[in-house]
Every structure is written in structure tokens, then in C-alpha cells.
Image (cartoon, rainbow, N blue to C red):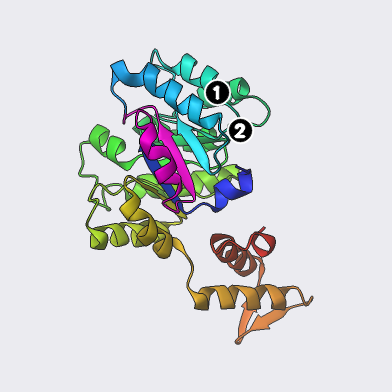
Amino acid sequence: MSEESLIGARTVLFVPGDRPDRFAKAVASGADLVILDLEDAVAPDAKPEARKAVSDWLATGPSRVAVRINPPSTPWYSADVAAMPAVPVMLPKAQDPVEVAALASELGPDARVIPLIETALGVHRAVEVCAAPGVVRPAFGSVDLAAELGVDPADVEALRHARSALVLAARVAGVGAPIEGVTTAVRDEEVLLADCAHALSLGFTAKLCIHPAQVAAVARAFAPSREEIEWARKVLVAAGSGGVAVLDGKLIDRPVELRARSILLRAGDSENGA
């Protein structure tokens, strides 16, 4: 999966690494990216078997797939990294840029790393983590961070600062916009859409899903409206005409043009969003 496709992904679906019967179904869900999870979704005694199942399935060459490995502090990390072919890798508990860089080095020149920021230290060091070699875009681990801070993960105000810090860190580091954390209310679409709207308002452009039933709603929520797309295209046409550009009586400067390109990138128009 290309770096451009990773940055443009809106729906990111987890599937347990010890459930190979669900791998193909997850890909068929329509998610932009499927993450085979070797960490939280797999019990300690099942991790070797899960790693083999993931490695064997990846050898068949599926597309739009990444792997969440175990953190460097665990006994499974080295074996996880050694078993990974050339696929994107999500690093949980990402909080040390040295560890992120070391992972990228082990993965090789085509490394594509998604650091999962889910600790207070990770938020504090988010700029350095996002700027580490191989990082494509970060993801936000709201549930784990909330547990560490002693707050309710459903309380958007409690984690607003952390979310905004991650959005700013990604921009400072020049990587893709962050992926929002999970909504644990699997069947409550109202809560899911509210979470999406809040994350989008802060600058997130994608969301982690824990069930295929969430994928379609998340895709709709993060897709720009037809009006936004039409406006963005008009902005780029006007900006490309040279000189001082005005659209609907409003000056088009560089920040307006960048916002238009961001909208088109979210819409999947990589040519104009690049």
C-alpha cells in the first residue's frame, strides 16, 4: 500500500490476528485499510500462533492491509518485526522517537510506520515521534490514554487538548493528518457520528473502527460534501489563473488553496489534492 493511499485512508478497521477466518471478510468490508492486530486483540499465549497466521496470510499478497505489532517493551516485539513483509506497521504505545526510528530501520527502506499515540508521554513527544523516519501518519489511542489520565474516554473535552496536540504535531512534522481513536459503542451510530464530527472539527481525517458495521458510517462522516468538493475545485481553478484570485467576493490566498487541496485529498482526488 502506497504512502499516498495510507494518508488518504478514511476508514481503518482492526481485525484480531488470531482470527484468520475474518481477514478476508475485513478486507471485503470496504475499509480503506485493515489492520491485523497482534497486540490488544490477542491473548499472550496465542500471540505466536496469531503471528504465524498473519504472516502466512500476508504472503498471499492482500492489498490495503497493515499490522499492529506488540510494543518494544514486550517479549513479542522482535519476532513480530522479523515476521513482517513489506506492509505498513502500526506501533502501539509510541512515545520514543528513537524506538520509532529503530523500527523503521529494521523494516527497511520502504518502511511505513503508523505510531499509535496513546500515552501522556507520547502526546508530550508527539512532534518528535511524528518526525521520526518512516512515519506516514499518527493514530490516536483515546481509550488507553484516558485510562492513564483517569478520565472517561467518551468525554471529548477531557481529551480535546491531546487530540489537538496530535493534529498540530502531525502538521509540524509534515506527515499525514492523524487517525482518530475507536468508538467502543459498536452499534450506536449516533454516538459514532458525533465522535466523527468532533474529530473532523479538530483536524483528524480518518478513524479507527473495531467492527465492520462502523465502516460505512465513518466513511460518510469523513467524506467531504458535494458542496465542499465543488468549492475546492473552484478555488484551485481560480488560484491557477495567476495574479490575485477572488472567488465569490473573497480573496484566495495560500491558506485557502491549501484547505481546498486538503478537501480534495479527503475526497480521493489525489491529483488535485497533492
Residue 152 visible at all? yes
User: Residue most toward the bottom?
Assistant: 249
Q: Picture coordinates of residue 159 (x, y %)?
A: 30, 47
Residue 70 visible at all? no
Q: Which amino acid is tagged 2?
A: Gly
Left-right relation of 46 to 32:
left
Tag 1–tag 2 contact (CB < 8 Å): yes
- Against 242, residue 119 (above or below) is above
Mark 1 element type:
helix
- The residue located at (45%, 54%) in the rendering is 30
Q: Picture coordinates of residue 122 (x, y %)?
A: 41, 32
Between 197 and 214, the residue placed more toward the observer is 214
- Position of the C terminus, as image quadrant, is bottom right
- Position of the N terminus, as image quadrant, is top right
Q: Picture coordinates of residue 124 (x, y %)?
A: 42, 35
Left-right relation of 6 to 160:
right
Q: Picture coordinates of residue 144 (x, y %)?
A: 29, 35
Q: Mark 2 points at which residue?
A: 134
Left-right relation of 65 to 191:
right
Q: Name the residue under label 1.
A: 103
Quadrant in the picture for residue 109: top right
Between 235 and 265, the residue placed more toward the observer is 265
User: Residue most toward the right?
Assistant: 242
- Against 73, residue 241 (above or below) is below
- The residue located at (32%, 42%) in the rendering is 142
Report if residue 58 lies within the magenta region: no
Whole-angstrom CA distance, mark 1 to mark 2, is 9 Å
Of mark 1 and mark 2, the one earlier in the sequence is 1
Q: Which amino acid is tagged 1?
A: Leu
Q: Give the range drawn in magenta.
A: 17-41
